[in-house]
Amino acid sequence: MSTDTQPLDKPVPVSGLSIYDPVHLGIDERGYGVDIELIYRNILLGGEPGSGKSVALNNIVAHAAMCTDTRLWLFDGKQVELGLWKSVSDVFVGPDIDAGLQRLQELQRVMDWRYDELDRVRRRKVTQTDPVDVIVAVIDEIAYYSATIGSKEQQEKFVRLVRDLVARGRAAGVIVVAATQRPSADIIPTSLRDLFGFRCAFRCTTEASSDIILGHGWAKQGQSATHIAPEDRGIGLLLAEGGMPRRMKSAYLSDADIYALVDYAHQLRTTIAY
């Protein structure tokens, strides 16, 4: 008698993704999948409240959570956007500027240690075969830490630390994913914005705000997130290194989807050596 339909008495073997695999973000206006290679890159997302920025952010976090070679460091002043992923993160910082600074400095020390090791073995970057996990640091609403809480000195220090991690972290296996609903020059200085290899602008109210995310001059070339209709949530302009902005729609993850993925991530971390 066949037992194909009998209940399984052992967990189903699972296999995880790798952060070296392309990250699926959604589809473009021609229906093609939009996938980016986030390894050795950083990404900046911005747009007005309700534009769908958090949807895109969750797609990136979901991929990282499924990766067995990745550690998640989450910074979320509101605690609710990234809070669903808290249980599968290695670090979670809420509305605490002191904790945020402490963790960024810790991550900076990890980065420096990795560069010392790379120098010792005469290597230029961390690779997939190395016995070190890639760290994905996700900062939702960077303005909360850089312009809202804490003293001016603390806010400036937070921005300096983020800038250093974005500038130097890639080859050491440190990826920064930053998002803001306040795209302005005081929140995202040009010196920081230009370090991000990938940028995605969701609906913005002004062309200046769109250019804060994508880069100066794109609005004059007709590439402005102000052209996105208010009802078109999840639609943004994705700029990759050396390319043209690409209009795309983010794949949607409901809270139920996220909880299911969190449960699956837990299974990955208990089934596969991590």
Image (tube, grey):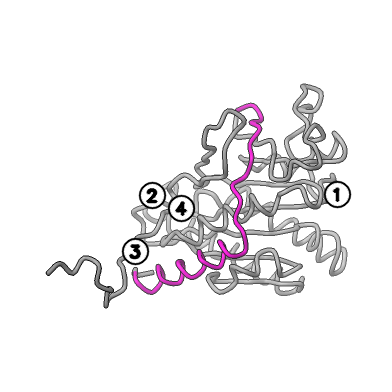
Whichever of callouts 2 and 3 sits on the residue coming sooner in the sequence is 3
Q: Earlier in the sequence, mark 4 or mark 3?
A: 3
Image coords of residue 100 (percent x, y): 70, 69
Amino acid at the residue labelled 4? Ile
Query: How far apart in space, not on screen, are marks 1 and 2 (Cα)?
Result: 39 Å
User: Is residue 222 positioned above or below 170 on the image?
Assistant: above
Answer with left or right where residue 269 lies relative to residue 150. left
Start-end of magenta stretch: 243-271
Residue at disc 1, secondary structure: loop
Distance in Å between CA atoms under marks 2 and 3: 36 Å
Which amino acid type is marked by label 2?
A: Arg
Where residue 220 appears, as percent x and y from the top left, is 81, 23
Kindly identify which residue carries mark 4.
19
Which mark is first along the chain, 2 or 1? 2
Q: Could you tell me which residue is drawn at 31 percent across and 73 percent down?
A: 11
**Which amino acid, mark 1?**
Asp
Mark 2 and mark 4: Cα distance apart in space? 24 Å
Q: Which residue is mark 1?
A: 186
Q: Would you say residue 172 sits in the magenta stretch?
A: no
Secondary element at tag 3: loop
Q: Which label is found at residue 122?
A: 2
Residue furthest left as drawn: 1
Q: Closest to the observer: 1 or 120? A: 1
* Quarter placement of the C terminus: bottom left
- The mark that comes first in sequence, 2 or 4, is 4
The label shown at residue 14 is 3
Image coordinates for residue 128, horizontal then vertical, percent: 38, 52
- Residue at the image point whose x is 50% and y is 54% from the top: 172
